[in-house]
Image (cartoon, rainbow, N blue to C red):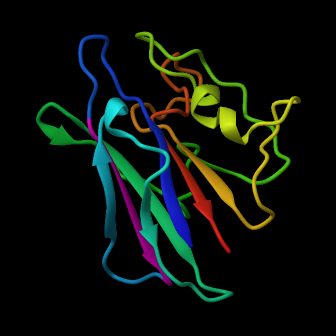
Amino acid sequence: MKVRVLGSAVSDGRNYYDTQLWYKVNGGWNWGFLFQGKHLEVDPGVVVLERSVDEGDTIQFGGRYLNRYWWHTFFYSGSNTPNLLALKNGEEVPETHAPSYHQATVESFLSPYLDEERRISIGPRDVILLFELTHTDTTHWGFDMQDLVVLVTFE
C-alpha cells in the first residue's frame, strides 16, 4: 500500500491552516501519523506511507485541521460521517460547493486522475479519499470536500 496526499486546502481567506492525516490497520489502538502541512507544502509525488498489508486487512484513515490554536474534530473512515468520501475507479467526482477564499477545487487536486467524463481513473484496487474538515452541515457553502485529498494505491 502506498499513500500520497494530493491536496490540502483549509483557509479563512487570510491564512491557510495545517491539516493532518493519520491511519491504522486492523483496528489497532494507536493511529499512525502520516502528514501535516498546508496547501503549498503538499507534494503529490511524495509517498507518505509505504507498507505491506494483507488481503482482508482493515485500513482506516483520519484527518483534522489546526485553526490557529487548537485541533478540530477528527474525522475518520468507518465513523458514518459525510465528511469523508471514498472514490473508486469509474466513479464520478461529487458535485460540491465552490471553495471559498479562492481555494483550489477538488477537481484541481484530482485532475491527473480524471477522465474526459469527470470520472475517477485509477487502479481497480485503489481509492481516493476526500475529507471535509471544517463543516458538518452538507448544505453549508463551506462543505466542499477538498480540505484533504488522499490517494491510496495497492500493488
- Prevailing secondary structure class for the magenta stretch in the rendered image: strand
**In what quadrant of the picture does the C terminus appear?**
bottom right
Residue placed farthest to the front in the image? 45
Q: Is residue 109 left or right of residue 76?
A: right
Q: Measured from the top left, where is residue 80 in percent x and y?
A: 58, 56
Q: Is residue 17 above or below residue 74?
A: above
Identify the residue shown where x is 33% and y is 54%. 35
Identify the residue shown where x is 14% and y is 31%. 68
The reply to whether the magenta stretch includes residue 25 is yes
Q: Is residue 22 left or right of residue 96?
A: left
The reply to whether the magenta stretch includes residue 58 is no
| Quadrant of residue 115 within the rendered picture | top right
Q: Measured from the top left, where is residue 46 in percent x and y?
A: 43, 54
Total numbered labels? 0
Q: Measured from the top left, where is residue 143 in percent x and y?
A: 52, 26
Q: Which residues are magenta?
A: 18-26
Q: Measured from the top left, where is residue 76 in percent x and y?
A: 46, 58
